[in-house]
Amino acid sequence: MSELSTEAPAQSGKPTIFFDGVSSRKRQVTLTLGDALEIAEEGGTPVSWVYADIRRADSPAGILRLASTSAPSLARLEIRDAALAADVTIRCMRLDEHQTSRRGVAKIVGWSMAAAVSIVCVVLFGVPLAADRLAPLVPKPIERRIGDASEVQVKTIFGSSGCEDPAGKAAFKKLVNRLRDAAGLDDDAMTAGVLPSAIPNAFALPGGKVFVLNALIDKAENPDELAGILAHELGHLKHHDNMRGLIYNGGTSFLIGLLFGDVTGSSAVIFASRSVVEASYSREAETAADTFAIDIMHALGRSPKPAAELMFRITGKEGGGLASILASHPLTEDRLARMTKEDRPASGPPLLTDTEWQALKGICGSGKI
Ligand SMILES: [Zn+2]
């Protein structure tokens, strides 16, 4: 057992129960979160569970019930204290590995039960800190589930059909792939799509999903304009800004939704998708995403300036109204000046051919070419 921070949080609250899987006796135990999870009954021999072996078992709401692949198959640990459950959950990176998608919602709820309460606790002491700390800790599968759920919601808002023109999709995929490769993002870590909407916008959902609303493509005059904005969104993805925003902006309504298991078609996700679609990130996050975009465009031998020009044209035409991309990404003087300063003559090949660009413009099949 490590001597470093092995103390479990105060366990005065709700009891933790352990069934050893051999006898049917219900034991009240104390947990120590060391190199492994130590389960100790007063007067008994402690049992040690390796975190990587711990899996979530079916449980009623409010209880985190765990099994271990290296313990007797009927062995169960039941944690009722939410803060303790959150602490244990964060250490068990393979908690939900065995689950199938059918169990997806329960997984989110189960994880959220634990995480939400711990988030709520930290909310009391400072939300930004909580969001910053928690965003990178959200396990990938959970982030992906939240992303999937948000995507469903986003598609009910914008409509899921209409931007399926094969040549347009191929061109879009090529553009996204070039940016993704230059950004060094995982192959399976992201998906991208175009949605029909009269609002010029682009946004990233948790789990690596980037969406562009086709009005933005309509307004773009060349691939570089669009690419710069996509690259900026990739920056938000890379930096987990969307998860951070979800936790930060979501605050209690998001958490309450999750706590009540209200995840799939409901307030939590409506909130979640609204929050990511309308996400307003901190100035620091915007600057970091711009830096990311500038680096990607330079790596591709293209200028980041056209993206700023596109954003500027949208402001010009729409006065920076709420409906535009500028609501979530205000094009401040600083940003415009910076992207202009980073202008370079093109040293790389065009990101798309003229034919591909025209195909992308027609991706929603609206005849606007
Ligand atoms: Zn942004």
Image: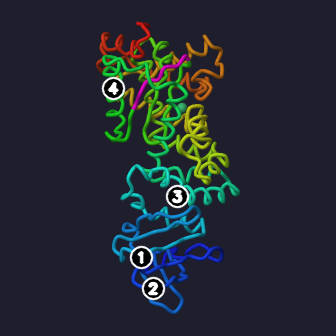
Q: Nearer the viewer, residue 80 or 277?
A: 80
Foreground mark, 3 or 4? Answer: 3
Front: mark 2 or 1: 1
User: What label does residue 110 carry, if any?
Assistant: 3
Q: Quadrant of the C terminus?
A: top left
Colour pattern = rainbow
Mark 2 or mark 1: whose residue is earlier in sequence: 2
Three-letter code, disc 1? Ala
Is the Cβ of the residue at disc 2 closer than 8 Å to that at disc 4?
no
Instruction: Give the distance between the C-alpha atoms of the residues marked 2 and 4, in whole angstroms.
Output: 54 Å
User: Can the viewer see residue 72?
Assistant: yes
Identify which residue, 251 or 163, lies in the foreground. 163
**Tags 3 and 1 touching, CB below 8 Å:** no
Question: Closest to the observer: 322 or 232?
Answer: 322
Looking at the rendered structure, the kind of residue marked 3 is Gly
Percent position (x, y) of residue 68?
Answer: 39, 71
Residue bearing the label numbered 1: 75
Q: Secondary structure at mark 1?
A: loop
Mark 3–mark 4 contact, CB under 8 Å?
no
Which range is magenta? 192-198
Q: Which mark is residue 173?
A: 4
Q: Which residue shows up at 54% across the image and 89% down it?
A: 42
Q: Report which quarter residue 282 is drawn in.
A: top right
Secondary structure of the residue carrying numbered label 4: helix
Instruction: Indicate whether 175 appears above or below 183.
Output: above
